[in-house]
Amino acid sequence: MKSGFVNIFGKPNAGKSTLLNALIGEKLAIVSHKVQTTRHRIKAILTGEDHQIIFSDTPGIIEPRYKLHEKMMQAVKGSLEDADIALLITDARENPEESHVIFSALKLKVPALVVLNKADAVSDEDIDKAVDFFKQQPYCKEVVVISALKKKGIEKLLATIIELLPEGAPFYEGDDISDLPTKFFVSELIREKIFLLYGEEIPYHATVLVQEFKEKTTLIKIVADIIVQRDTQKGIILGEGGKMIKQLGTLARKDIEAFLDSKVFLELFVKVRPKWRDNEMQLKEYGY
């Protein structure tokens, strides 16, 4: 039996969450074309006949500007400390030097696979150049070329990871696919829809707190608060005559029903909490 922790690092928007979902075969991490969607460290457990891999999707590496950002970077630091293997993901369309600066700064002490993502969007010549570049770096054990969105190269990546994993007993029993509670994933699915429906500013000023999660005989009742910083943002979330929040609720409910495999009654409220991103107590309450 082989088992270990495999942690995913990279710039915002390199495709870390899409890769995690492709590796697990389930939608665990929320995905958006906007940067810095992931705020928490999400552990996902993949158990096979002869292996157990605990993947971690970490927030994109950024310069902290708020206490919230500091918490996000603490999650990255924690991931460095318990990794058996590091997956260093980079966007094949970008200059390899940019990711190289970040990967070097991690000062990894474990084997690292450089994962060249979005490879379907560039020429073979560019891929070869990037592969040659990373192969020369001291932190790189191997380069694996993939498209996480199209699930290309995922099988090869998994086989390479299993080969490098240390031998050992599983860390988790049963068939759980994460160590995080269901409520966390529900709040993340609602937050994903905020990224989808609203402009540049709103998603970064908003968070979601599930206040009630009750399993009834025919459905699950969920009540959640959307937290924003200003009254004007509350107005935008609600939309004219509550039109926007209705759309948000409908989209989120569909995804939550698919995730929980159950009918869901979802009730959303919008609360204003000024400067919550810099308030230690509020960050704790919201799970950061």
Image (cartoon, rainbow, N blue to C red):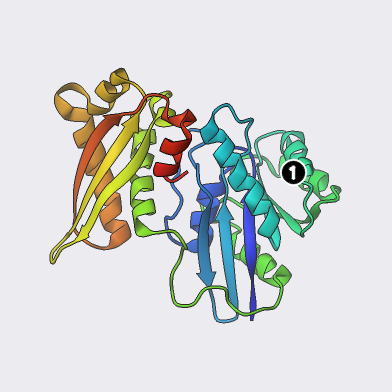
Q: Is residue 112 above or below residue 32?
A: below
Q: Is residue 47 above or below residue 122?
A: below
Q: Where is residue 199? Give x, y as percent.
A: 38, 24
Q: Is residue 71 above or below residue 244?
A: below
Q: Nearer the viewer, residue 11 or 65?
A: 65
Q: Nearer the viewer, residue 188 or 143?
A: 188
Q: Where is residue 48? Give x, y as percent.
A: 54, 76
Q: Is residue 269 above or below residue 205?
A: below
How packed is label 1: few (under 14 Cα within 10 Å), some, or many (20 or more)? many
**Residue in view at x 46 percent, y 31 percent:** 279
Quadrant for residue 6, please give it: bottom right
| Left-right relation of 138 to 221 | right
Tell me the quadrant of the picture where the N terminus can be found.
Answer: bottom right
Q: Where is residue 244? Give x, y as percent.
A: 23, 29
Q: Is residue 8 visible?
A: yes
Quadrant for residue 31, please give it: top left
Query: Which residue is situated farthest in the front direction here?
Result: 281
Q: Is residue 118 visible?
A: no
Quadrant for residue 263, please give it: bottom left
Residue identified by numbered label 1: 103
| Left-right relation of 102 to 14 | right
